[in-house]
């Protein structure tokens, strides 16, 4: 098939061994690319039950299948490893240009193992691959690192970590072009390998099977996007455009560490308020014609000179609502700290909101916070604590391990306030009023996550794809819904297409582009079967690492405390509902009640190794 670089690159940083292997037909046919290659390689190349920071833990980078072919929004790349936050698969997707560059260098996957003796960076210059000294880069922020690597190597694409990754903050991220593989701590694994950056130069031709058909399809999709009625608001206000709607109309914006479902002080953090004041221009991921990112700048006052890419909806929640902060400049400064230090804004904000809850409930004392007055809404304390997390200072050292471990370390009943699923801090959807998403949080193979199903949009509007009249307050029929959404949505990570294009691209839309790129005729049904195969293999990896049925559990705040006010007032997910939805899901998946795929199901999917 066309469309591939043709090789998998293996780098052992411990022994400085570099080797290449040809991409096998079986890999292509069964897993296609991107997230499919990542999970298969992770499964094959991992030593079972190793620690995430063990040098043998592979860090795998896989471009999406469409990367390098100008497909609108089709430039995503997957960073995948065992997550130090959850101990499960940690696959995180970003929109930086490094994915396409890797394809142009001839690689469909890079597998990095071992730990370098000294700080290092990896240079992949087409066929020439070198491990180089990064002693002078160690300690640098993300943007400074990228700049320094480019000064040394010229015109390269750079993915790098900041000090948080070096300090093994368990939710450290990897950045390329101000886009992040944010979740699951992939940056911490990179730091544990003494690997500061990956620089790539790829100048080889990538020729699709049918260039004319591909060009026509690409133009068709660009036109669909730019002519859509949502284009203007999507690009003007970005991912936060529905913040007011989620608060006032749906009442599911988790606030003050999930105490409330509506943030009364939200006016200033709403992009309809701040975009006209602070937004200078649009920014986009690589290969995107719908630039939902923005350059956000502050020109005067104590944060004068700040210039960040953002602020995304999830960050308005985590550094805003969860911490009770309604001041947009504080949220922007917190966003900058996370970007520079290289930390996931969701987990970092959730960890601080959790600490504030403990402080207000007398579980953390002022002495334990290092003198910080950690009440909700104390913006100075929030910013100080972000710095402390990145440096692992005082309370920051405890919070750097994530909410689950922090609760275990603090004790005194702190676990009652810890909001996480399988060790992952949640995104901005109060699932007490979105029951399908409550199930999706539990079934996601990387813990509480909105991007493994994107079912929030389906549940909050009542319709998407083949689903109609969905009732977000009901726990009926969610097993099949979430199974089908997972198998659809993983395809975006396989092909490297942004999930914000899902209003334009469904599985049937992918088939034509796939044919133009690769020459293969793959039906919509076969594509969805591939999605199912990949999700089953992710599950097998997690089971091998020790996950059990007991890990499918929602936090106490969701099962015991109803939303106190607003449009979702009185709703929660009872333990009975939680268990019933899970049973429905295991049946829909063809798994046993213990969450283990049956032999019959695996044979049907061709997972026979
Ligand atoms: S729609 Fe937004 S997130 Fe998606 S590829 Fe474009 S800029 Fe990136």
Image (cartoon, rainbow, N blue to C red):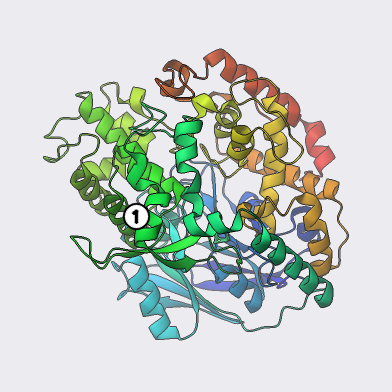
Image quarter where the N terminus lies is bottom right
Q: Secondary structure at mark 1?
A: helix
Can residue 592 be spotted in the picture? no
Say if disc 1 is inside 8 Å of ligand 1: no
Horizontally, residue 276 falls left or right of residue 158, namely left
Left or right relative to 540: residue 419: left
Residue 569, x across and y down, in percent: 45, 20
The residue that appears at 71% across and 42% down in the rendered structure is: 487
Give residue 499's position: percent from left, percent from top: 62, 52
Q: Position of residue 578 (x, y in %)?
A: 57, 20
Snapshot quadrant of residue 598: top right
**87 lies above or below 513:** above
Q: Is residue 13 above or below residue 564?
A: below
How many neighbours does mark 1 have within 10 angstroms: few (below 14), some (14-19), or many (20 or more)?
many
Locate residue 198 relative to residue 366 in the image: left or right. right
Residue farthest to the top, as pictured: 576
Along the line of sight, which residue is nearer the eye, 189 or 250? 250
Query: Dot 1 corresponds to which residue?
Result: 335
* Number of residue marks: 1
Which residue does the image show at 67% across and 51% down from the upper left?
502
Q: Determine the quadrant in which ligand 1 lies.
A: bottom right
- Residue drawn at x 52%, y 28% as measured from the top left: 551
**Is residue 291 shown left or right of residue 23?**
left
Q: Nearer the viewer, residue 551 or 484?
A: 484
Residue at point 31%, 61% (across, down): 163
**Residue 532 point in image, percent of width and height:** 74, 42
- Against 231, residue 299 (above or below) is below
């Amino acid at each position: 098939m066309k469309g591939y670089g043709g090789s998998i690159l293996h780098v052992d940083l411990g022994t400085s061994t570099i080797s290449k292997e040809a991409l096998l037909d079986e890999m292509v046919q069964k897993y296609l690319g991107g997230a499919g290659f990542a999970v298969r390689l992770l499964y094959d190349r991992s030593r079972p039950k190793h620690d995430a920071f063990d040098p043998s833990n592979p860090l795998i980078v896989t471009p999406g299948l469409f990367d390098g072919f100008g497909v609108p929004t089709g430039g995503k790349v997957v960073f995948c490893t065992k997550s130090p936050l959850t101990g499960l698969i940690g696959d995180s997707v970003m929109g930086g240009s490094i994915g396409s560059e890797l394809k142009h260098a001839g690689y469909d996957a890079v597998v990095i193992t071992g730990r370098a003796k000294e700080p290092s960076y990896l240079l992949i210059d087409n066929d020439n691959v070198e491990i180089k000294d990064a002693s002078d880069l160690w300690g640098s922020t993300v943007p400074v690192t990228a700049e320094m690597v480019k000064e040394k190597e010229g015109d390269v694409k750079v993915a790098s970590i900041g000090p948080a990754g070096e300090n093994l903050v368990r939710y450290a991220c990897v950045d390329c072009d101000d886009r992040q593989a944010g979740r699951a701590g992939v940056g911490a694994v990179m730091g544990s390998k003494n690997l500061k950056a990956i620089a790539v130069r790829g100048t080889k031709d990538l020729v699709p099977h049918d260039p004319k058909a591909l060009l026509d399809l690409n133009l068709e999709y660009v036109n669909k996007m730019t002519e859509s009625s949502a284009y203007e608001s999507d690009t003007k206000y970005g991912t936060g455009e529905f913040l007011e709607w989620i608060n006032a109309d749906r009442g599911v914006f988790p606030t003050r560490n999930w105490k409330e479902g509506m943030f009364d002080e939200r006016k200033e953090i709403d992009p309809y308020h701040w975009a006209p004041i602070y937004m200078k221009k649009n920014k986009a991921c690589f290969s995107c014609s719908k630039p939902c990112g923005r350059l956000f700048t502050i020109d005067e006052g104590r944060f004068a000179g700040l210039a960040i890419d953002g602020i995304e909806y999830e960050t308005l929640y985590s550094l805003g609502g969860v911490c009770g902060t309604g001041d947009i400049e504080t949220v922007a400064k917190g966003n900058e700290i996370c970007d520079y230090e290289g930390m996931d804004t969701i987990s970092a904000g959730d960890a601080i909101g959790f600490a504030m809850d403990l402080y207000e409930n007398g579980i953390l004392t002022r002495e334990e916070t290092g003198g910080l007055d950690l009440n909700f809404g104390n913006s100075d304390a929030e910013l100080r604590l972000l710095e402390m997390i990145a440096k692992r200072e005082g309370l920051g050292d405890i919070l750097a391990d994530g909410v689950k471990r922090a609760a275990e370390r603090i004790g005194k009943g702190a676990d009652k306030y810890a909001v996480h699923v399988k060790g992952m801090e949640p995104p901005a959807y109060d699932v007490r009023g979105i029951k399908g998403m409550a199930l999706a949080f539990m079934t996601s193979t990387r813990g509480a996550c909105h991007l493994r199903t994107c079912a929030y949009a389906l549940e909050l509007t009542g319709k998407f794809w083949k689903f109609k009249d969905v009732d977000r307050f009901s726990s009926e029929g969610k097993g099949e819904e979430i199974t089908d959404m997972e198998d659809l949505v993983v395809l975006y990570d396989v092909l490297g297409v942004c999930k914000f294009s899902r209003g334009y691209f469904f599985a049937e839309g992918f088939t034509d582009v796939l044919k133009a790129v690769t020459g293969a005729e793959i039906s919509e049904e076969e594509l969805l079967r591939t999605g199912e195969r990949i999700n089953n293999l992710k599950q097998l990896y997690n089971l091998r690492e020790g996950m059990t049925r007991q890990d499918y559990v929602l936090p106490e705040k969701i099962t015991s405390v109803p939303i106190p006010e607003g449009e979702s007032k009185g709703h929660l997910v009872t333990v009975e509902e939680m268990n019933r939805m899970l049973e429905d899901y295991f049946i829909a998946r063809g798994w046993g009640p213990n969450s283990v795929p049956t032999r019959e199901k695996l044979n049907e999917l061709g997972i026979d190794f």
